[in-house]
Image (tube, rainbow, N blue to C red):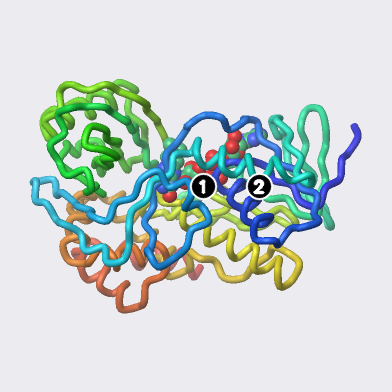
């Protein structure tokens, strides 16, 4: 089989692959490189919605596709207490994946140096000076391969592997009486028998809202359970009984303290496959953008994509691993843990913590807000795992 040569290959063109390809070319880091993008999908569906917070003083390359933003955020405890969040300069943003794909792909298609192949990748081989991507019909070789294909890793007995599973629905209704400029970041006013369970409520207009039923646990529910929970929440909590479903999505995000490897020779793993998903929250978008910035800075300075310090550093990995162990013990229930956290710590400090931008003082605040007796043993175990 003939092997075709490129300078850079993207194995997978979802959020991470497209972010890096777009920003690498747009920011002028790759001007003469021949780039190949391989994916089994053509990315023409609105298959997910990305939400993330961002300090308003910071620029985002994807601002043109922000679908909606909120400045007012609230949290509800399981008992129904509302906590208006002090999110400081942070706004919460939503991007619909279809807008992101179209925006990035229309830019990349204009570049004569970018080639697209729609095919299933069967393997990626690493050789001393290149990565080789194998599909059924062809092999492609490049000095650097950016891989974002995720598969569940082989876990060690001590690794935690939670699933964040959720169903989201965009609904149209005349019965929403809430404030359309306020979103609910976590609303725990829902039964907790299947794990740490909450709703996101994201109104995009007075008569249109995105409602997402989310669970942190180790196994999925049967399909109809997500729909029933959404129906009950809409009726009992928001008082909405008449609505039309415009769109829906289902997703599963791994929340794990497994150590993903960033790199295997010339193959660089990015996105969820590269460990850019924050274990304690499942948020991935912002961490991936930070990894992209690090790759491009390295390329610009040193001519290669291998960077040193990870954005999600050892300190944050230790705290995340501890939180997952606490959730696993289930003596300190997840809804109680998050309620204690949001009661005692300003959301702006929690956001900085989850973006790995927190100071030691912020981290201490986070730890002190939680019930220490549940944390000591898991913390020591996680620490031991990291140093051994
Ligand atoms: C429904 C959903 C909603 C989410 N919402 C949020 C959110 O609000 N905020 C947040 O921060 N994170 C969110 N996430 C988590 C994370 O941001 C997304 O999963 C994100 O898409 C991860 O980017 P990625 O590039 O790592 O993976 P993907 O975007 O999944 O891209 C991987 C690509 O690899 C391709 N691929 C896989 N296997 C092969 C193969 N064998 N051959 C060829 N191509 C292959 C796939 O087709 C895909 O295009 C969400 C995840 C899901 C599933």
- Of tags 1 and 2, the one toward the viewer is 2
Dot 1, how many residues are within 10 Å of its Cα: few (below 14), some (14-19), or many (20+)? Answer: few
The one of 49 and 176 positioned closer to us in this rendering: 176
> Residue 343, image x and y in percent?
16, 61
Residue at 23% over, 48% down: 181
Task: Residue at the far bottom: name it.
Answer: 361
User: What is the C-alpha distance between the residues marked 1 and 2?
Assistant: 20 Å
If the image is split into quadrants, where does the N terminus sit? top right
Where is residue 178, by image quadrant?
A: top left
Q: Is residue 191 left or right of residue 248?
A: left
Residue 101, above or below 41: below
Q: Are marks 1 and 2 in contact (CB under 8 Å)?
A: no
Task: Residue at the far right: name it.
Answer: 2
> Residue 354, image x and y in percent?
37, 61
Q: Is residue 332 left or right of residue 236?
A: right
Q: Is residue 171 left or right of residue 125?
A: left
* The disc label shown at residue 308, or none: none
> Residue 228, image x and y in percent?
23, 24
Q: Is residue 152 visible?
A: no
Residue at 29% over, 55% down: 326
SS at mark 2 in the image: strand
The one of 99 and 381 positioned closer to us in this rendering: 99
* The disc label shown at residue 155, or none: 1
The one of 303 and 25 positioned closer to us in this rendering: 25
Q: In the image, is the residue at mark 2 within 8 Å of ligand 1 by its beta carbon?
A: no
Residue at 36% over, 66% down: 353
Badge 2 is on which residue? 147
Q: Is residue 74 left or right of residue 219?
A: left
Where is residue 362, by image quadrant?
A: bottom left
């Amino acid at each position: 089989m003939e092997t075709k040569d490129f300078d850079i290959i993207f194995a997978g063109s979802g959020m991470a692959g497209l972010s890096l390809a777009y920003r690498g070319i747009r920011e002028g880091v790759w001007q003469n490189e021949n780039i190949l993008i391989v994916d089994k999908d053509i990315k023409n569906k609105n298959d997910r919605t990305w939400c993330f917070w961002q300090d308003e003083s910071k620029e985002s390359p994807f601002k043109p596709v922000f679908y909606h933003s909120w400045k007012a955020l609230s949290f509800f405890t399981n008992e129904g207490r509302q906590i208006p969040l002090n999110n400081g300069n942070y706004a919460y943003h939503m991007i619909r994946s279809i807008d992101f794909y179209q925006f990035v792909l229309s830019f990349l298609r204009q570049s004569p140096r970018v080639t697209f192949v729609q095919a299933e990748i069967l393997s990626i081989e690493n050789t001393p000076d290149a990565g080789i991507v194998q599909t059924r019909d062809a092999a492609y070789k490049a000095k650097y391969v950016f891989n974002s294909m995720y598969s569940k890793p082989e876990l060690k007995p001590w690794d935690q592997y939670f699933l964040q599973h959720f169903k989201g629905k965009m609904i149209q209704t005349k019965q929403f009486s809430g404030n359309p400029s306020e979103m609910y970041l976590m609303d725990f006013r829902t039964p907790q028998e299947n794990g740490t369970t909450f709703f996101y409520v994201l109104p995009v207009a007075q008569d249109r809202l995105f409602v997402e039923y989310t669970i942190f646990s180790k196994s999925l529910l049967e399909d109809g359970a997500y729909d029933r929970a959404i129906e009950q929440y809409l009726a009992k909590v928001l008082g909405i009984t008449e609505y039309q479903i415009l769109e829906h999505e289902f997703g599963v995000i791994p929340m794990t303290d497994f150590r993903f490897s960033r790199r295997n020779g010339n193959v660089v793993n990015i996105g969820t496959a590269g460990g850019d998903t924050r274990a304690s929250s499942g948020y991935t978008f912002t961490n991936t953008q930070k990894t992209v910035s690090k790759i491009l800075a390295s390329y610009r300075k040193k001519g290669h994509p291998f960077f040193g310090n990870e954005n999600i550093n050892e300190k944050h990995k230790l705290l995340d691993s501890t939180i997952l162990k606490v959730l696993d013990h289930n003596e300190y229930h997840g809804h109680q843990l998050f309620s204690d956290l949001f009661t005692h710590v300003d959301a702006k400090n929690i956001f900085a913590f989850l973006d790995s931008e927190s100071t030691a003082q912020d981290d201490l605040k986070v730890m002190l807000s939680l019930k220490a007796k549940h944390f000591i043993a898991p913390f020591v175990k996680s620490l031991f795992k990291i140093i051994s």
